[in-house]
Image (cartoon, coloured by chain):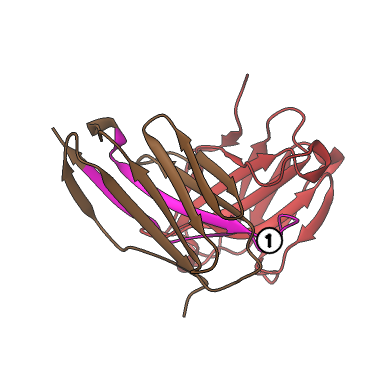
């Protein structure tokens, strides 16, 4: 079974440029998460989707970050414009969610390592 | 005070040692407790998943939850060099809300 797929794996951009990350969750997983992980720290939740609805985006910096999950499957996370402090690994995860009878068994993709110069 | 705290590490042990990794938390509403392992330049992978207090064993790994003390532990028996990774505790409320990771402990098992 294929795991969570993310692309690109690495991205280097100059500050003030836009950038987008793509995630394809595990088939059948209703819940999708985007996290940001800074070096030496645990992942921090940016946004959680239940199907196509964003149910928790309280930690998403909405002035420059946006996300969408059209048709409740793939998702994109966008930053515009990027700042130096956005350099981090952006992780996507998915889970069955409560509808599948399981709670928080999240499965992570390999992440996108973003460097803003 | 952070919501979830974890032994800072890094931790180095010889092969075959018993490893104890610990987290404390402040939110008494947490009911689901997890341990993830993260290898360098990879995403975290779920190791152990427990609900409420008690112990759960899976091979060389044992997860322990003490809700009264707001303390969780992961024990690794007969540690192997392949166990070298960062270990992240994570927890959430009864409906998956307020999901939060600890900062992680980096473990090195030396051959």
Q: Viewer-proximal residue, A99 or A29?
A: A99
Image location of residue A73, percent across then percent down: 78, 36
- How many numbered marks, from 0 up? 1
Mark yes or no: residue A13 visible. no
Image location of residue B26, percent across then percent down: 53, 74
Q: Viewer-proximal residue, A34 or B50?
A: B50
Report the residue at 77% width, 30% height from top: A28
Q: Quadrant of the N terminus of chain A?
A: top right
Chain coloured red in this rendering: A
Q: Viewer-proximal residue, B19 or A79?
A: B19
- For disc 1, the chain is B
Report the residue at 68% width, 30% height from top: A26
Image location of residue A81, percent across then percent down: 60, 64
Report the residue at 19% width, 34% height from top: B16
Mark yes or no: residue B32 visible. yes
Chain coloured brown in this rendering: B
Relative to residue B60, is residue B69 drawn left or right?
right
Q: Quadrant of residue B68?
A: bottom right
Q: Quadrant of residue A25?
A: top right
Relative to residue B89, is residue A24 drawn left or right?
right
Residue sitting at the far bottom:
B1
Q: Which residues are magenta?
A: B83-108
Residue A47 position (above or below residue B76): below
Residue A49 position (above or below residue A108): below
Q: Does the stretch in magenta take in B95?
A: yes
Report the residue at 57% width, 46% height from top: B50
């Amino acid at each position: 079974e294929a795991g969570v797929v993310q692309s690109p794996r690495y991205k280097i951009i100059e500050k003030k440029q836009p950038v987008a990350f793509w995630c394809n969750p595990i088939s059948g997983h209703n819940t999708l998460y985007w996290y940001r992980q800074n070096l030496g720290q645990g992942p921090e939740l940016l946004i959680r989707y239940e199907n196509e609805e964003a149910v928790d985006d309280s930690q998403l910096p909405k002035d420059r970050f946006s996300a969408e999950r059209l048709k409740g499957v793939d998702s994109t996370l966008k930053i515009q414009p990027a700042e130096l402090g956005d350099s981090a690994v952006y992780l996507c995860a998915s889970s069955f969610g409560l509808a599948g009878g399981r709670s928080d068994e999240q499965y992570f993709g390999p992440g996108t390592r973003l460097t803003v110069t | 005070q952070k919501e979830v705290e974890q032994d800072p590490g890094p931790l180095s042990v010889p092969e075959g040692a018993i490893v104890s990794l610990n987290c404390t938390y402040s939110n008494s509403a947490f009911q689901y407790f997890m341990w993830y392992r993260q290898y360098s330049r990879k995403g975290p992978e779920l190791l152990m998943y427990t609900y409420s207090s008690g112990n759960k064993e899976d091979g060389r790994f044992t997860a322990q939850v003490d809700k009264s003390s707001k303390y969780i532990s992961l024990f690794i028996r007969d540690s192997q060099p392949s166990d070298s990774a960062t270990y992240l505790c994570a927890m959430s409320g009864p409906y998956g809300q307020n999901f939060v990771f600890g900062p992680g402990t980096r473990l090195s098992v030396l051959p």
